[in-house]
Amino acid sequence: MGIASMLGTSIKRREDPRLITGQATYVDDIKLMGMLHMAVLRSPYGHARIQHIDVSTALQAPGVVAVYTAEDLKGKVGNIAVAVPLGHITEGMGCRGPLAEGKVRFYGDPVAIVLAETPYAARDALDLIEVDYEPLPAVVDAEKAMQPDAPILYEDFGTNVAHSVHPPTDEIERVFAETQANGGVLVKARLVNHRVAPVSMETRGVVADFRKADKSLTLWSSSQIPHLLRNILAAQLNLPQHQVRVIVPEVGGGFGSKLNVYPEEALAALASMLLGRPVKWIEDRSENLAVTVHGRDQIDYIEVAATREGKVTGLKVHGISDMGAYCQLFTDVIMLAFGYPVSCGAYDIPTVHLSADIVFTNKAPTDAYRGAGRPEATYVVERAMDLVARELGKDPAEIRLLNFIKPEQFPYKSAAGAVYDSGNYHAALRKAMELIGYEQLRAEQKQQSGDKLLGIGISSYIEICGFGPKGSAPVGLYESARVRVEQSGTVIVYTGASPHGQGEETTFAQIVAEEFSIPVENVLILHGDTDSTPEGRGTYGSRTTAVGGSAVFNAVQKLKEKMLLIASHILEASPDDLTLEDGKFSVKGAPSKAVTFAEVAMTANLSNTLPKGIEPGLETTVFFEPDACVFPFGSHIAVVEIDKETGQVHLKRFVAVDDCGRQLNPMIVQGQIHGGLAQGIGQALYESVEYNDEGQLLTATLMDYAVPAAKDFPPFELDHTVTPTPVNPLGVKGVGEAGTIGSTPAIVAAVADALNVAHVDMPFKPEKIWRIIHQQP
């Protein structure tokens, strides 16, 4: 393999050796001299007033150094940040400080913290804090929370509805009436996208170290957003940004949950400032399930009109988003900003009407979870296509192929307002159908008998990602790269992104190696330290390669231009006559007249005879802000078998054909899809966060919250199409969330198909399926 063939090559992830040999450093591995340990007292109620807190006994416990309540922290720390406040949230509704003040609003709401010499002493002291609660009625259902007689979380506002969007319905009602008048159909449904927990393998954690001598705060955090965390924390604690340093060591999974800023970061930091000692807090699994943001939890009422031939003429969606008790960083915009723009999916739907209510309930806050709004939107439009197919007695694949946006229509502006960059949706679905043997499966299904039911489900998704377009957010969502070529020829890249499992230490190195024509081993990728990396927006939303990788690519181009000038000076040739191949700058047509990459690097860094106008050194910083988002897509097909006697759903086969544009490392792409599929299928079949009517969490352990294991999945059958995007110089689209977005609707469609019903809500626990089969209430 030549040096210049790095991109598109499946090389092993360079991150893996330290991970699989136990040599990686996580937050819990950080140990500092004199470090205290923090434990958090959390509400056992879903909704209650705090009448009184007595910490005197806890303060006397062995090893306890301090106990703080909200009263102790008044004036010392600000509220947790909300990125884009909407409606009543702009007036403070749903905003909170790090500790509950006067009232708790969900099970796990933080009430007090203990600082002690050991984690055991800190946790034991929690039991000694006496809190007098006045329990209040709770509301855990978003639709019930909208009723006039519902318990109110924020009395000053007199409602639980934080924000509503209700555009006029004249146009969509006209389309519906016209379609029906011409013999078409109108199908309605209520769809529930239930609440799930991200359950990253590593829970959250933070170590804070405030040094009074220079008033500097260093924070180690398991975070996806080091620079945003630094900026928000500095504002919360009233510190200049340059005095706050955030270091993100290894992160054992995030899935969007570590995109947020939580109470514990500010609490640990403030405790360190007050006590003059480092402070560590590590979340346990029960805390993780109770208080780390949950995902999904959206109810959609849909109406879809179609001609007798199956052409969809209009789609109406009313979404009810359950935010939980508080608004986190992006909670209020998940549905509106990330989901609704792709409400039409991969289809040429001429008219769409989107309305929404965003509601507070007595549950943990929701926010970004792998897909963030796009799985919910995809679920809606994919179920709509299946419902139309069933109503008309047509095959679901036929309906999709009829309604797909055609390749020649790109760039395509959907009725929901998004401009899709590129795509060939027909090709992806046809390839998936061929791989699974679709026609043969349908024939087998018609012949089935006995105690098993066969179901086949299709999902043809698109997603919006690569967030960063100018003017698309209140702040710039650019990404950054600082690239330096050392005198030895080694290249060091400092990225503002914060990869944590996406494999960017490998793919970014491949970009550099390809463009500089050097061995990938000669490239070092550094990230996760706000003192050394350029300002960046972090890793989330399938944006890191599309935006961060493009910043790396553009930085390399700038340095390559400079190196060509230096090489031309050494070789006494025009830069236009030089090529860079196999680690050498050589004259076209005279390959023996050459100088190595390392020799040019040495000259740039050490020579005192550089050409006029060229500064010494090889280093540049580039910020990349794309002009538009990118839109990966794909088609997934699931085959399930249901046991009539037990209601057990068995996933027999799963085919996924995805298109993320140009693939820089196909093996990493497949790994990302595998992980996404596991989480998307897990939601459909097993996972569900459950509360009782009083707001008590019923799934507080992994004995109650069912996370799938490898044995629960068949070998995934993956393939791809390649439709590069014109939006960035690499032609890449995101892939980290694709598996999650596409898989859930395919499983739901397959189960409904097996049961021969229009729709059944997730998750598909055996009892639910058995009752449907046997028509039991």
Image (cartoon, grey):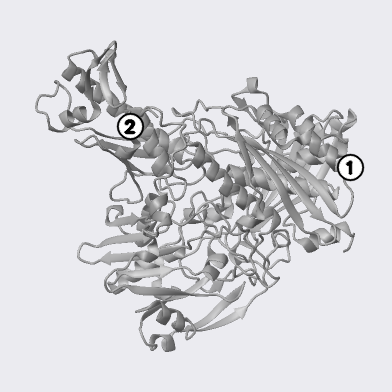
Q: Do the residues labelled 1 and 2 touch (CB within 8 Å)?
A: no
Query: Along the horizontal axis of the image, is 84 left or right of 207?
Result: right
* Residue 77 appears in view: no
Quadrant for the C terminus in the image:
bottom right
**Eyeballing the image, is 133 above or below 420?**
below
| Amino acid carrying mark 2 in the image | Ala
Please, what is the three-letter code of the amino acid marked with disc 1?
Gln
Which percent across, then down, holds residue 771? 85, 61
> In this view of the protein, which residue sits in the foreground, 102 or 233?
233
First-in-chain label (1 vs 2): 1
In this view, 379 is above or below 324? above
* Residue 447 marker: 1
The spot of residue 152 in percent (x, y) is 65, 66
- Residue lying farthest front? 1
Q: Mark 2 points at which residue?
A: 555
The residue that appears at 73% across and 55% down in the rendered structure is 762
**Residue 195, visible in the rendered structure:** yes
Q: Is residue 340 above or below residue 69?
A: above
Which residue is depicted at the point 68% across and 44% down? Answer: 654
Displayed quadrant of residue 416: top right
Label 2 SS: helix
Q: Considering the numbered disc 1 on the image, is that residue within a helix, a strand or a loop? A: helix
The quadrant of the rendering that contains the N terminus is top left
In the image, 211: left or right of 300? left
Between the C-alphas of marks 1 and 2, the distance is: 60 Å
Seen from the viewer's position, the closer of residues 613 and 657 is 657
Residue, far top:
589
The mark lying in front, picked from 1 and 2, is 1
Mark 2 burial class by Cα count in 10 Å: few <14, some 14-19, many 20+: many
